Amino acid sequence: MRILVILFVLICSCFNRVIRQPFFDVLSVSHLTGLPLTSSSPENQSVKSAVEGVDLSLPIELKKDVLVLGAGYENQYITFDNSDFHASVQSFKFPVAYFHQWKDSLWKTTFVGIGRHNSLVDNKWNSTSLQYGGAIVFAREKKKNLIYKFGLYYNSEFFGPFFVPLLGLEFRVNKRLNIHGLLPGNMNVEYKLNTWLRTGLAFRSFTSSFRVKEKSFLRVNDNQLRLFLDFYLSKINVISIECGHSILREYKPGIRINHESIYSDQDSRDGLLLRVAYQLRFRLDEEKSTKQK
């Protein structure tokens, strides 16, 4: 227990000195189930999916900056009701992030590099399934409770180079209400009901691709709106329960020839979502109150 308290203090001091955010998850283990909402038709098929994931992040203090080393694994199984199409895909992730604070303390920059191996579960590890990407994010502190963010994301997807501009904020409205995120990837509205329970809305957007064969791939586009409940079993142990719905979801088999991607028709219908997760979470927005205790 004493080791966890020391780790809590170190993580809080590291990140609050460099870049403010409500919390930092050292460990996350999750399961998400996707279910069809209505009966399907051949033109617009219902999809069942299951996603298991685990992510680990280790922060290292470097004078005024922070280096974060990460690793993660995700497995997703997708099946269509009225089709022979099904796929079991996996992703090994190795992110590295560097948080830098400039001499002008109002400006902070995050540099992120990400290596991935995305493929069918049955595929062997090979170079054609590797992806490389990253992001750069600038943060400007407007007020003590308000930070603006902007940047650029890139990944070498199997359907071609993928660039996305980023725009977000960290806004602590009051002691109970937080709004934070980086669009188009995520945005969160979090409300503290009491010391052990928080609730709110979370938006998530995903674009990824998985190697099927040497030139063929499966592209996944998904947007999700979820209502969540976070149960704080202790200061750092959190159980999250989320339910929601997918928006404009697409699973698109494709092949890339001569720098051009060609897709097969595989229309999919949106459906319900249920996610359960455990997080080893360190709240950064309650550092002062924790030190006082």
Image (cartoon, rainbow, N blue to C red):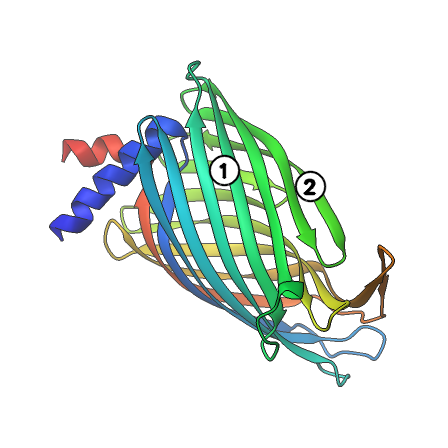
Reading the image, the residue beneath label 2 is 164
Q: Nearer the viewer, residue 92 or 206?
A: 92
- Taking depth in this image into account, of 162 and 165 the one nearest to the observer is 162
Q: On the image, numbered disc 1 is attached to which residue? A: 180
Nearer to the camera, 193 or 50: 50
Could you tell me residue 119's position as x and y percent? 62, 69
Residue 99: % across, % down: 43, 33
**5 sits left or right of 171 in the view:** left
Placement of 81 over or under 262, stated as above or below: below
Q: Residue at x 84, y 65 (%)?
A: 263
| Number of marks present in the image shown | 2
Mark 1 and mark 2 lie on one chain; the one further toward the N terminus is 2
Residue 293 rendering spot, x and y as whole percentages: 14, 36
Q: Element under label 2?
A: strand
7 in relation to 212, above or below: above
Q: Within 10 angstroms of label 2, few (less than 14), some, or many (20 or more) residues?
A: some
Q: Looking at the picture, which amino acid does disc 1 mark?
A: His
104 over 3 or under it: above or below: above
